[in-house]
Amino acid sequence: MTSAAAAEVVARAGRASDRSDLQRLGTRFRPTSLAGEHLLPVTAALQGVLPVGGLIRGSTVLVDAQRASGATTLALELLAGPSLGGYWCALAGVSQLGCLAAVERGIDPSQLVIVPSLGAADRWMQVLATLFDSVDAVLFAPRTAVRSSDARRLVTRSRDRGSVLVVLDREKSWPGPSDLHCTVTSSVWSGLSRGHGLLSSRSYRLEVSGRGAAARPLLASLQLPA
Amino acid sequence: MIRTLVVCCPDWPVVAAGLADRPAAVLRGNMIVACSPPARAEGVRLHQRRREAEAACPELVFVAEDVGRDVRAFEPVVSTVAGFTTSVEVSRPGVCSLAVRGPARYFGGESSLAVQLTQAVAGVVSPLKGPSCWIGIADSPFVARLAAHVAGESSAGAPDPGSSTDGVAARVLIIPPGESATWLADLPVGLLGNRELADILNRLGIRRIGELAAMDEGLVGGRFGAEGLSAHRLARGIDDHALVPSEASPDLTVGCELESPIDQVDTVAFIAAGMAEELLGRLAPHGLGCTRLLVEAATEQGEKLSRWWRTDWPFTAKAMVDRVRWQLEGWISSPGEVPSAGITFVRLTAGEVVQHYGRQLDLFAAPSEASRRVERGVARIQGLLGHASVVGAVLAGGRGPLEQVALVPWGDPRQGGGKDRVPWPGRVPSPAPAVVYGEHLAVELISAAGDPVAVTGRGQVSAPPARMRRLPSGRFAEVVAWAGPWPVDERWWDLNSHRRHARMQLLLEDGTAHLLVIEGGNWALEATYD
């Protein structure tokens, strides 16, 4: 009943006015319907966007973009919540990722494991599996196309270990299943003009779909950095 | 009691670095941990800070501490000493010991053995321009080590051992059997090797080892705990860590036959980590720790190298793995017999077990279950991909997005952190770009008139940028908005690392924002705000 009610509100979410409703609902339901240990916290900005107001342990979240930029920042924001909550995070296969941006988003560098390059084809599955055993949330950015059988094995492994897998898919290389699929449909920078100002903040429009509570796709907007 | 001979090569870290004949010092962080005789003559001392040492001796050469290098360089010395007896133990690079009874009989008495040893070691050390070794002989390894130390200290100014036997004799100190406690009594308590304890004892007015030995054992134990008791035993000339030249029982041995030969030290060390855990796991239920470890390795061709290693505190698994790594690295780089094939056999043997009372961990510093789980996982990945493959991030000072975060291999000390977050004028403003290109990607930036955009010496653009494209063959994209340039003139005091450049933020028509940098007239893409 709770998830149906949540889905009801989620379906209307995205507009800022409904976000407070959702948050209220979320705090009211969480202790009864969702055991705290099954849900990793997310930052305030994302609470209104994710169907259950958190990252479900063992789930896979796919982040990509459709003719828009900003997927990397969104993926880091997804990890920031667990890290702020004291959970360990890992960045895997992200040699070009700006670690300063990760820290600025709120990821605690003292509880962050970075594996910049995952090594040869026969090793990277093993490395990721080890990371699932060790940390609570893993950001994985595949550089080449992932075989769908490998993707399925990864998803199963992360579900077994109760670790959240966030896949940052810049090049459409993740074939497989995901529990939650966040697509950036547009992102608009503000603050910069011709010759003055600074890049300060970006407003996103997202499409969030997936399984379970997220089965009905929803459109959401969000401001990062908030 | 087993008569023990200790060979001590003074200033070994400096000798290993090949800097023994000039003013040089080895640094751990900011502290001097070893210095060469010329540096000491200028007033450089151990535990001094770098700046004080530089003030004492401006031409001082510094090298960072590297135990692996020290061990590799020490390997020829150990092989030489092993020519005299079969059971040589390495305490740490620069110090090794052997049971003296058998060899003394064979080489014509203790002093004769010491002289021959000194000359043999000098043959190895003198090409490295190292000073002559010191030798102490006593009833226990601890007293013998102290004797060697005292002999060395008092021999300053004695003639070179190469030219006369007097010089050799000056560097050898033999404590007759049964006289250890008497000899120790007059020495300062600081020589017991526990600086914190010595500090407290000094403040209590107990300055000589004899004064500590005269105290009641129970009272010392009650006041200073396990460390105090072990110091008290040493003060009475009783050494818990006697040389025991007996065969170890099979329970204390963990061996591993490798299916395929391994030619990488890292991989062997990874396997050894599991063996060390197993060995400690067998000892732990009995409340025992191991202070003497035999590491044996063999190659596919049947070459073997075994070495004894010793510590004052019981070995941890990591310390055991370090010994395996050092031994193999020393073997590979030794001038003599180098292994000609991959390693196929490794065995660890606990040669001496002691009651292990453990060390009380700090309540708040104790690692949590989660961080232990992470450490295990990281160790496994490092075993797969290599030590530097897993990194941690440390905030550092700097202006560019790459400089502000230092990536440190996991397990290495993390320096920097909070105190370096002081203002850096010219720092790239927040928010930081989420994608940073390791090597800059060349781009072309032109004005509306089609001329290349340049940055003047006063930090102004020659014309507003209008279009940008990736070189060599990108398509031009309109520049919608831009800011900058922010000129940076870094390290102008150093000709080699001087760098002058300017950065700009650009927003393109497709909504992507980028950080550009111009250096030497060429624009490059440094990062993208993805």
Image (spheres, coloured by chain):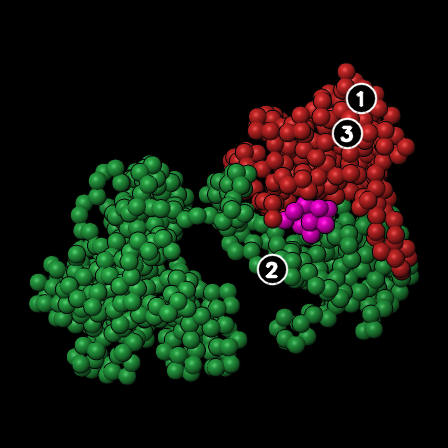
Chain colours: A red, B green
Q: Is residue A179 above or below residue B370?
A: above
Q: Nearer the viewer, mark 1 or mark 3?
A: 3
Q: What residue does disc 2 label? A: B416
Q: Is residue B470 visible?
A: no
Q: Where on the picture, by quarter, is residue B89? A: bottom left
Numbered range of the magenta stretch: A98-109
Q: Is residue A104 magenta?
A: yes
Answer whether labels 1 and 2 touch (C-beta < 8 Å).
no
Secondary structure at badge 1 equals helix
Query: Chain letter of disc 2?
Result: B
Amino acid type of disc 2? Answer: Gly
Residue found at x 48% / y 40%: B376
Which residue is at the front of the view, B384 or B399?
Answer: B399
Q: Residues within 10 Å of mark 2 (few under 14, many from 20)?
A: some
Q: What residue does disc 3 label? A: A27
Q: What residue does disc 1 label? A: A7
Query: Chain letter of disc 1?
Result: A
